[in-house]
Amino acid sequence: MRRWNGWGDSNNHYPLKPSGLAFIQARLGRAEPLPDAEMAAVIAQVPASRLPEHPGVKTDAETRLRHARGQSLPDWLAMRSGEFERFPDGVASPSSSEEVRALLDWALAQGITVIPYGGGTSVAGHINPPEGDAPVLTLSLAAMDQLMDLDTQSQIATFGAGTPGPKVEQQLRERGYMLGHFPQSWELSTIGGWVASRSSGQQSMRYGRIEQMFAGGRVETPKGTLTIPTIPASSAGPDLREIILGSEGRMGVITEVKVRVTPLPETETFQVAFAPDWDTGKELVRQMTQAKIPLSMLRLSNA
Ligand SMILES: Cc1cc2nc3c(=O)[nH]c(=O)nc-3n(C[C@H](O)[C@H](O)[C@H](O)COP(=O)(O)OP(=O)(O)OC[C@H]3O[C@@H](n4cnc5c(N)ncnc54)[C@H](O)[C@@H]3O)c2cc1C
């Protein structure tokens, strides 16, 4: 099960190695780790929900706790210490665009603040409930996690916006295609979240950034449904996709994402080379980039 106060699955453990501990102690000195808050104690802090009853909205304390924070350092400090500050008043997990539409209409009529929630890996604080008198509904896209269509002629795939990275690649690879968008949060982040946060992947050099992959889709806005067709490049008018890319949920809830996909490569290899010093390394990277060598990733690291 997903960890409630940190990253990843609670069955995976990565204990700090003695050499790592010695390295940190040599630089920062000795310190006593603060105790982690117990989940039961935090659950006891969750206040009563301010939402009117709705059959599609969960208001139990644990569900609200699990959707209260992202994954930034301040979020981690809050979660590990048990000082969450605020919780959403309820969490809905609709399974279709129509259900999202109905929930949005209900929330708007009741003066409820809505936060779209993909994988909850935000490091910008945008999924954390804001302060204020309005009740907060977190709208999770988790149940919309399927490949809905694959047009092999145009090489455009349509996904439910809540599809997480591993499910995007798995469903495409079964059909001989791949997307190739690998932010470091890939394991938990979702395709709708990538569009909403204009995310950047490790292999963007070959497969493109999310703004090059995002071909269109469906957004449920407060004013109605916005369908963005997958028109080829146009020289007339503004590009509506740009309004949605990086909008962080402010323009509405993205429910379907159409992306440009690529046939699987015959082989893919990753190589490591050692440069004698930093300046040579920088020059090598510059030359390889400017020569447009078809690499998917190029990364220069110091010692
Ligand atoms: C360990 C770690 C590594 C990371 N690595 C990278 C990286 O390499 N590159 C990178 O760019 N970012 C990275 N991030 C940041 C984050 O993972 C990305 O911004 C990611 O795209 C968020 O996706 P998500 O599905 O988790 O969205 P969430 O965190 O759930 O939401 C992010 C924002 O998008 C909105 N949103 C989410 N889904 C929708 C939707 N369907 N419709 C409308 N709005 C929506 C939310 O309201 C919020 O404002 C990293 C974060 C962590 C914790």
Image (cartoon, grey):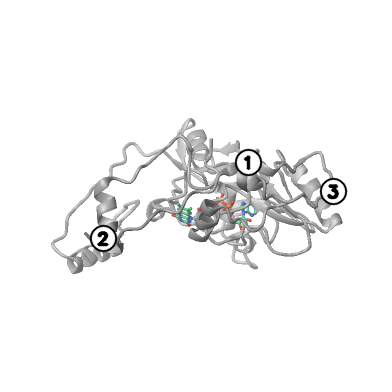
Mark 1 or 3: the one toward you: 3
- Lower position in the chain sequence, tag 3 or tag 2: 3
Q: Give neighbour class at mark 2: few <14, some 14-19, many 20+ (Cα, 10 Å).
A: few
12 sits to left or right of 161: left
Q: Amino acid at mark 3?
A: Pro
Question: Circle 2 is placed at which residue position?
Answer: 288
x and y percent of residue 253 in the render? 69, 53
Q: Earlier in the sequence, mark 2 or mark 1?
A: 1
Helix, strand or loop status at disc 3: loop
Cβ at disc 1 under 8 Å from ligand 1: no
Classed neighbour count for the residue bearing mark 1: other residues with Cα under 10 Å, few (<14), some (14–19), many (≥20)? many
Task: Give me the residue at 78% from left, 40% from top.
Answer: 56
Instruction: Label 2: state its secondary structure.
Output: helix
Query: Which quarter of the picture shows residue 131?
Result: bottom right
Q: Earlier in the sequence, mark 1 or mark 3?
A: 3
Q: Nearer the viewer, residue 60 or 302?
A: 60
Q: CA distance from mark 1 to mark 3?
A: 23 Å
For disc 3, the marked residue is 52
Q: Residue 142 bears which disc, if any?
A: 1
Circle 1: residue type: Ala
Pick out the residue farthest to the left: 276
